[in-house]
Amino acid sequence: MKPQNKLFTGLLTLIFLLPGYNGFSQAAQKGDLGITVSYFISNNMIPSLMVKVKTKVDGKFKNVEGISLKLFLDKDTAGKFIAKVVTNDAGEATTYIPSSLKSQWGKTLKHTFVATFDGNNKYEAAKGDVTIAKAKILIDAGSDKTVTATVFEMKDTTWVPVKGVDVVLAVKRMNADLPINDKPTFTTDSTGKASGDFKRDSIPGDAKGNIVLVAKVLDNDQYGNLSIEKTVPWGAKFAMLNTFDKRTLFATRDKAPVWLQLIAYSIMFAVWGILVYLVFNVFKIKKLGEDKIS
């Protein structure tokens, strides 16, 4: 083969190999993250933020743990910095808005909360935000057991009632809130009020019959999550019964119910009786064999 042909063949081979080499040398493709920012304010006090991070794996969304995020008020600049958080095993992280941003908080009626992720060796950089208008919620309980929530939005320098906001009226319980009646939500009228009749008369309260009413606005596009609580004596009085020194299933061993002790001891004596009987018969058989041999 002529030198020119060899050179031409070598160049063609190199051209065909380079794209494949580049493909193998490229790093694995990084994943994309979705960042959701939620705004919360309880009892019209200090607002807080919750950030949730997800990624899509095999067509399904999965919570992402250990993602470091920076939170900002309105703009992702140093002077607007809120906090740095890291997501937990549920892909969530929460923080309060610091008092250092109080002056900036009061300058405008709407704020945008920004969450940024700088990226790492596994995921691309990402950003999420939510824009919230300043709002508050009040709760009132009438003598006729009517619960009323009122939603206001700050406009100019005054609080203005808001119409058409869905509100949850409920009783606060340990695991989940219980609606005050069969209606799950109530909608505010032109005066910003949403009312419902309390129908949980037999619900247990504390020793004085006190229960905690709660009014909530959940995941509203304009106002985020608002909640407020009020204690009322509308529950059934609940007196804690101390059974520590009485015979119960949850007491100490010496305070176990007599019937349970009888069952336990009967089983124990039956098992040991059978074992003793078997051992006795083994020795009896052995002795009979020795007598027969002699």
Image (cartoon, grey):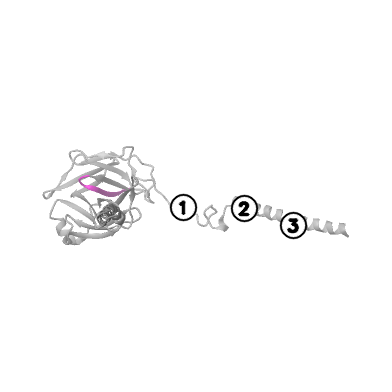
Of 77 and 244, nearer the camera is 77
Residue 266 picture location, percent across and down: 65, 52
The reply to whether residue 168 is in sight is: yes
At horizontal 33% and vertical 51% (from top left) the residue drawn is 63
Q: Are marks 1 and 3 in contact (CB under 8 Å)?
A: no
| Residue 228 colored in magenta in the image | yes
Look at discs 2 and 1 and give the one toward the viewer.
2
Tally of marks: 3
Work out whether residue 175 or residue 145 is closer to the camera in this orientation and state it: 175
Q: Quadrant of the N terminus?
A: bottom left
**Rendered residue at 52%/54% (across/down):** 250
User: Which is more N-terminal, label 3 or label 1?
Assistant: 1
Q: Which residue is mark 1?
A: 241
Give percent across and percent down for residue 215.
27, 46
For the record, the magenta segment spans 221-232
Q: Which residue is mark 3?
A: 279
Instruction: Tell me residue 41's x, y (percent).
Output: 24, 52
